[in-house]
Image (cartoon, rainbow, N blue to C red):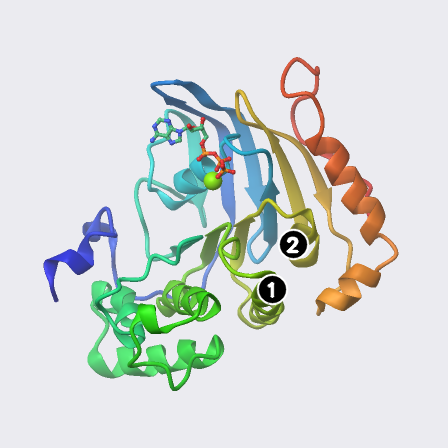
Amino acid sequence: MPNNSRRHTASSSTVTAPVARGDGRIEARNLYKWFPGGIVLEDVSLTVRSGEFLCIVGPSGCGKTTLLRLMAGLAEIDHGTMSVGGIPVIGPSPKVAVVFQHFGLFPWKTVHRNVALPLQLARAGGAETERRVSEVLETVGLTGHESKYPAQLSGGMKQRAGLARALAASPDVLLMDEPFAAVDAQTREVLQEDLLRLRDQLRQTIVFITHSIDEAITLGDRIIVMAGRPGRITREFPVEIDRPRTIAQVRRHPGYEGLREQVWAELRQPPAGSGRSGSGTGDAA
Ligand SMILES: Nc1ncnc2c1ncn2[C@@H]1O[C@H](COP(=O)(O)OP(=O)(O)OP(=O)(O)O)[C@@H](O)[C@H]1O
Ligand SMILES: [Mg+2]
């Protein structure tokens, strides 16, 4: 395997064989994160149940990506604790996969080789890798495109390939940072429907960052609202809409507009000194 294919894994020593899906519970306790510019996350505590689909919304710069990177073991926690499945997060793990907005595909590798990468890093055998790659490509609807290069794919297909790669090593947790922000509105809805279907099928714990309240309501079991300066959780809203869901059903749900307004209202709160802290529970939907 070429050396550069390992670059995206900060610590290959933490990679082990693919694991069967286990406990995907995420526990963050009293997290603080400082950067040279100042404090970014202040006293963030959060529990994500195993199998839960949690959406995070908040203004630009409030620390959403930073929180996700702490969950993924891609950044160091300055204070507090973070665990996944009861195990403290000390670095990247094959139990936790990340999907970013800009796909993160290696342009010089085919779809097949991009998707096979986590399995190779986990030292899966050739037959197991082949089986798993075709399985996940089928899951995301990319069968037949194995030998294409990323430049030959549409935005939606690139994102599917990124998702297939994230799913390849059967992670317990999927962390998604604005994964559909770079695709057109129509493709975005198709991908949302796909993710709804996948979620019901795979039951991973999913943490999904988005700037779209509609997307958060469509996909999430719960929505966390963050505020900035310093980044903190101000409120949470359960999304009490039955699954399986379709976008059309969600938009027609009697609780949809009300929940949308409540999340908007929370996002419009003044940034600091509003006297609100901790995570309240919304009575939306
Ligand atoms: N590596 C870094 N070094 C210094 N400051 C950083 C670093 N990464 C993030 N920050 C700062 O931390 C704050 C939070 O950034 P973060 O990327 O987590 O925000 P975000 O909520 O994801 O924003 P967006 O919605 O625009 O993606 C910002 O002020 C950012 O400038
Ligand atoms: Mg971000």
Residue sitting nearer the eye, 89 or 260: 260
Q: Is residue 243 visible?
A: no
Residue 99 picture quarter? bottom left
* Residue shown at 80% from the left, 41% from the top: 261
Residue 256: x percent and y percent? 81, 53
Position of residue 21 measured from the top left corner of the image (x, y, whole percent): 44, 65
> Where on the picture, by quarter, is residue 50?
bottom right
| Picture disc at residue 155 | none
Which badge, 2 or 1, is on the more N-terminal residue?
Answer: 1
Q: Position of residue 185 (x, y in %)?
A: 61, 61
> 242 left or right of 88?
right
Query: What amino acid does circle 1 point to?
Result: Gln
Question: In this figure, which residue is indicated by the disc labeled 2?
Answer: 215
Give the farthest residue toward the bottom.
144
| Number of other residues with Cα within 10 Å of mark 2, as a class: few under 14, some 14 to 19, many 20 or more | some
Cα separation, mark 2 vs mark 1, equals: 8 Å
Quarter of the image for residue 53 reads bottom right
Q: Quadrant of ligand 1?
A: top left
Q: Which residue is mark 1?
A: 192
